[in-house]
Amino acid sequence: MFKKVLIANRGEIALRVIRTCKKLGIEAVAVYSEADANSLFVREATEAYCIGKPPVNQSYLNADEIIRVAQESGAEAIHPGYGLLSENAEFARKCSEKGLVFIGPSPEIIAMMGSKIEARKTMKEAGVPIIEGLNTSLESENEAVMAAEKIGYPLMLKASAGGGGIGMQLVHSEQELFKAFAGNKKRAESFFGDGAMFLEKYIQEPHHIEVQILADSHGNVVPLWERECSIQRRNQKVVEEAPSPFINEETRKNMLDAAVKAAQYIGYSNAGTIEFLVDRQQNFYFLEMNTRLQVEHPVTEEITGLDLVEEQLKVAAGQRLSFKREDIQRKGHAIEVRIYAEDPKTFYPSPGKITEFQLPHGEGIRNECSIEAGSQVTPFYDPMIGKLIAWGTTRSEACARIKSALENYKIEGIKTNIPMLIKTVSHEQFLSGYTTTQFVNEYYLPQLSSTK
């Protein structure tokens, strides 16, 4: 096992990794920007080094500086967390070239799965169901319109290198597609340095369900059940739960089998997530693969009893998985909500100073955050400031616990999405267990309009 690991991230995920490292007796090295100098994750690390000014391109995306600090501090490996450099194939390659272990899959697999077009092709070869659409990029509006005529509307226009909903748009007609193409292509070029666009058939009443897998470098792949992630705003997840209340046992088995097949086909190693869209008839289709730890990994930990960061470290150190698929039993139900510093009516970020802060506690309640009273939420980073997780022996118990915990979550000085989350977990549609990716548009936004 490693003696010292650098965490190339910030906030709650940096703190999460630091605590597992310390549990295992591993020294944890933090890197931070000038804006995060007083953050909790910096104080909890064994060592901490400032790597630049607040903008991410001058700090947390500065791969060369992060690698320099890793080498100078004597770290043997780098854990990238999620976001930032976690799915950057070039960063993973540089780590290897400098003799550092990148805690994740190989650069080649990151690059392959980072392109949605290449991922579609690969999954089709592997025998995993994919959505009807294109496996080539589109160069112009006219080319997109011609392709759309063959597939049929409605369609999803997507950026091949995209993530977090950037460069993605639902289109219902030729006019909408023509109007959307240039803007989405430009956004993709700006955010990802790659403007490649493609089209997929839109799945009616889609459920976003993903399978967490762990794989070692010895060919072993174990699925860790599934997570329902259908409640999203601006195509970004805000509520996740495990297991999914929607799919039946036959669909569940088939999805887990497909995820294992996908990981084995590409020779995957470390933690990863195979994401699917599932229609109302429970047909499922490959959406994308995330080659890293997910924001929502705690709900999987709660129903399996595993520490996924610990398993990542073991796999990266060359160890075999210590368990098989049949060893991983589901226990109860877990729900996670993401706490954002944002206006709950507009979803716009709400930076500022946190004047009062008190976390909820109680049976089955888990908090993941790296803020405290006096913390400054800056405009430089993603507005997610924490995660709240509730576990129960049944889904009903988990729902009751997450609602009560949200009502007792105290944060002052900034706006947060907590009011939106309380409405969501209290809604009869959520409580019924049938939620699609249109939940926010169908149930939450109309409530806002009716109160104006």
Image (cartoon, rainbow, N blue to C red):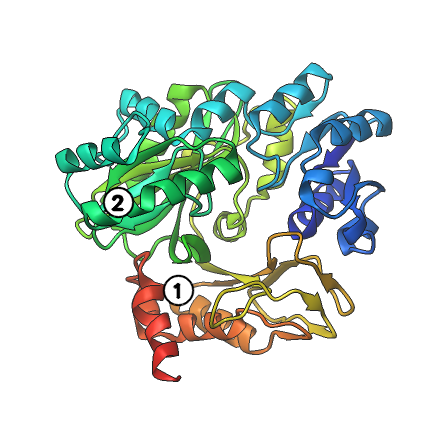
The front one of 200 and 93 is 200
Residue 22 placement, left or right of 432: right
The front one of 237 and 28 is 237
- SS state under label 1: helix
Residue drawn at point x = 77 percent, y = 52 percent: 36
Disc 1: which residue: 395
What's under tag 1, amino acid-wise? Arg
Q: Quadrant of the N terminus?
A: top right
x%, y% of residue 373?
Answer: 76, 70
Q: Quadrant of the C terminus?
A: bottom left
**Distance from the alpha carbon under mark 2 to that under mark 1:** 40 Å
x%, y% of residue 58?
Answer: 73, 39
Q: Nearer the viewer, mark 2 or mark 1?
A: 2
Disc 2: which residue: 177
The front one of 435 and 34 is 34
Residue 71 numbered tag? none
x%, y% of residue 374?
Answer: 78, 68
What's under tag 2, amino acid-wise? Leu
x%, y% of residue 152?
Answer: 14, 41
Task: Tell me the quarter of the picture where residue 396 sits.
Answer: bottom left
